[in-house]
Image (cartoon, grey):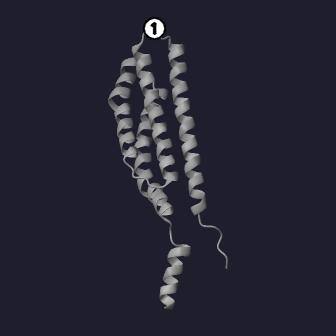
Amino acid sequence: MLLGAALYLRTTKFGETDEQRELRHYVVDELPVLIAQESAIHHGLDRLDREPLTAVAARTLLVNQLVPQLLTLQKQAGAIVTRSATLKELKQEYLRYIDQLIDACRTSIRTIDDPSVSPAEGLRRVRSRFYEAGKSSQAWSAHLRQACVPYRPGPTSR
């Protein structure tokens, strides 16, 4: 009977809730895969910013590598099963961020393709889109950290 009571207390007082389990799975199992893919995409985006690429080379990088990688990332992030309201919100925020990155890349392609857009105006448009995507990424990260706060272990008493 004592063993049964101990097991009951462990699962009710110290056990994980469904939301905790889901959040832990998201952070430990799902996010590292997404973040690794995102990192490769950012490496390609950094090339656009730091290397003197021709318009043709930049367009090729965007069309053949970065946009397809972003679409794959979007599909994988969208396929994550979420049950709790918090995780559903986090998933939607992350998908909005990816959508904004895709939009920024497509704006870059349109800017390259449109000879009527001045280089200064094109750069302003593209930087504005990437800035908005960066703000969304920061908001999602802050929301993720905030969602994890209640589940962090507190100080132990001795």
Image coordinates of residue 38 in percent, x first then y, are: 43, 41
Please name the residue that numbered disc 1 is placed on: 116
Position of residue 108 measured from the top left corner of the image (x, y, whole percent): 44, 22
Q: Is residue 53 visible?
A: no
Q: Residue at x 55, y 46 (%)?
A: 141
Position in image of residue 144 (x %, y %) = 55, 50
- Of the residues shown, which amino acid type is indicated by label 1? Ser
Whether residue 89 is visible: yes
Q: Quadrant of residue 43?
A: top left
In the rendered view, tell whether residue 77 sits above or below residue 155: above
Graded by Cα atoms within 10 Å as few (under 14), some (14 to 19) or many (20 or more), the crowding at tag 1 reads few
Percent position of residue 115, x then y: 42, 9
Q: Secondary structure at mark 1?
A: loop
Depicted 85 relative to depicted 108: above or below: below
The residue shown at (49%, 82%) is 7
**Camera-nearest residue between 130 and 9:** 9
Give the quadrant of the C terminus.
Answer: bottom right
Which residue is pictured at 36% across the width and 41% down the height? 75
